[in-house]
Image: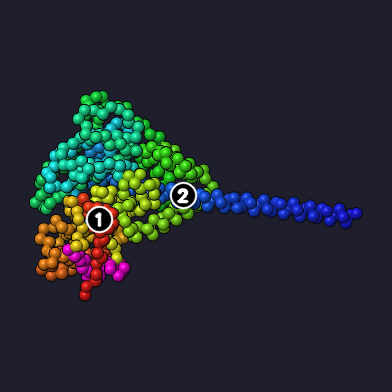
Amino acid sequence: MKNLVLLLTIVLLSTTACKKDHSADKQETATAESIDSITAIAKEAWIYGYPIFYNYKAIYSSAINKEAKEYSGFNKFKSVAASATPADTLIITINNDTPYSMAPINVSDEPVILEVPKIENDRYYVMQFVDLYTFNFEYVGSRATGNNAGKYLIAGPDWKGETPKGIDKVLHSETNLIYLVGRTQLHDPADVSNLKKIQAQYKLISLHEYSKQPAPPVKKYNLPLPVWKESDYASLQFISALNSLLQYANEDSSEKELRKRFAKIGIVPGKPFDSSKYPPETIKAIEKGIAEAKQELESKIDNVKDAGSLFGTRAELKNNFLNRAIAAAAGIYGNTKDEAVYTGSNVDKNNQPLSGNNNYVLKFTKDQLPEAKYFWSITMYNLPKRFLVPNPINRYSIGNKTKGLKYESNGDLIFYLQKDSPGKDKESNWLPTPKDEKFMFVMRIYGPQPEVINNIWKMPLPEIVK
């Protein structure tokens, strides 16, 4: 009998132990799944916020940091009446064809009116409106509205006022912070004085000044706009930055579930982020998510096949947040492809990386030249920085409007991509490359025609010459 009781006790204890162990296994699995979930959320959030953060880099320099050479203050233009040079490093893959008129805009308190002058018909210009997310939500300019003078009211997501008289169109943004990227064609160095006169007539006027009414109350936010630091977005500080910046953006209905997931790691607009409130395992999981996101983004930016698909409205991009981040990393403020198409390469015809140690020719047959309503150009950049390349003739881009460009007798066009002069007889078609560095080039086609927009037209690739 005693042996039977002992046996039953052993069986009971063994069964209980098995149940207990099984429960512990389940708990361990649940914890592992939770950690994996946190990593996935952090990765998704980092990619989602990347373009917001790097858009804010330009807004911060232009509107907040008074020490920056780009500073103008909110709702004011800062124009440059010259083509970009290697000293211009605020924006990667900077455009060298159309000098910029940039303006950081804040419509938290009230709308702002953009005034543009009448511009001669043979001069291309564009005003590109980029919201905080980096969606190109509206356009004013040669293609979209013509070259006549105009007045355009820029309104934030909550504005429901009456449109004053004299306004040609209301431009609705889903964020209160906006970056306005203006570009005006410069025909040649002798054209600078004409360009300055046009740029001086680009104006931004607050609604209350325009309508001669008292200023509205100032909208209060829970968190101040952050000091921009490059290192912040590689750390947990990216959450703090997002929480501040997302105060200026309404939550789109398509993002409700997304924002709920983000809240699990402390991403809540207007709420301070305190990492000390999270256990070490959660912090490590978030940091792992950041690392995975960085790795994925870096692996994508040098393999973009259709750059035109990376820029546009929310509807056009279909909430593809990875593509939006790739666009910001590869060339922030790119135009929607109806306005301009971007193509280019960092490899040659044999799929080898382009190097300043080699000499190349880039040949367009007569039938390969792209159709453009306005003009096209090719700009040289070093890698991995994506800045303009210093060179002895101070030429950073070349295109069909370049003075002195020489075509072959049969209509073909050959460019020489190399660090040293190809000879005086060929310098008209020389685009200098960097010395001892890898490089890439970008072709911009302004006013692209259907074959270019629809990817039927294909750009040739460079070939090495000895």
**Residue farthest to the bottom, as pictured:** 466
Query: How far across and down, in percent of the image, does residue 137 sit?
Result: 30, 42
Residue 42 - label: 2
Nearest to the observer: residue 199 or residue 165 = 165
Residue located at (14% from left, 39% from top): 118
Q: Is residue 239 visible?
A: yes
Q: Amino acid at mark 1?
A: Glu
Locate residue 197: give its quadrant.
top left
Task: Say above or below: 364 vs 12.
Answer: below
**Residue farthest to the right, as pictured:** 1
- Does residue 361 belong to the magenta stretch? yes
Locate residue 160: give its quadrant.
top left
Query: How far across and down, in percent of the image, does residue 338 sit?
Result: 26, 49
Q: Amino acid at mark 2?
A: Ala
Report the quarter where the N terminus lies: bottom right
Which sits earlier in the primary sequence, circle 2 or circle 1? 2
Query: How far across and down, in percent of the image, does residue 253 sit?
Result: 42, 38
Label 2 secondary element: helix
Residue located at (87% from left, 55% from top): 4
Q: Nearer the viewer, mark 2 or mark 1?
A: 1
**How far apart in space, not on screen, are marks 2 and 1 (Cα)?**
40 Å
Which residue in the structure is indicated by mark 1?
451
Q: Which residues are magenta?
A: 348-366
Task: Say above or below: 150 vs 324.
Answer: above
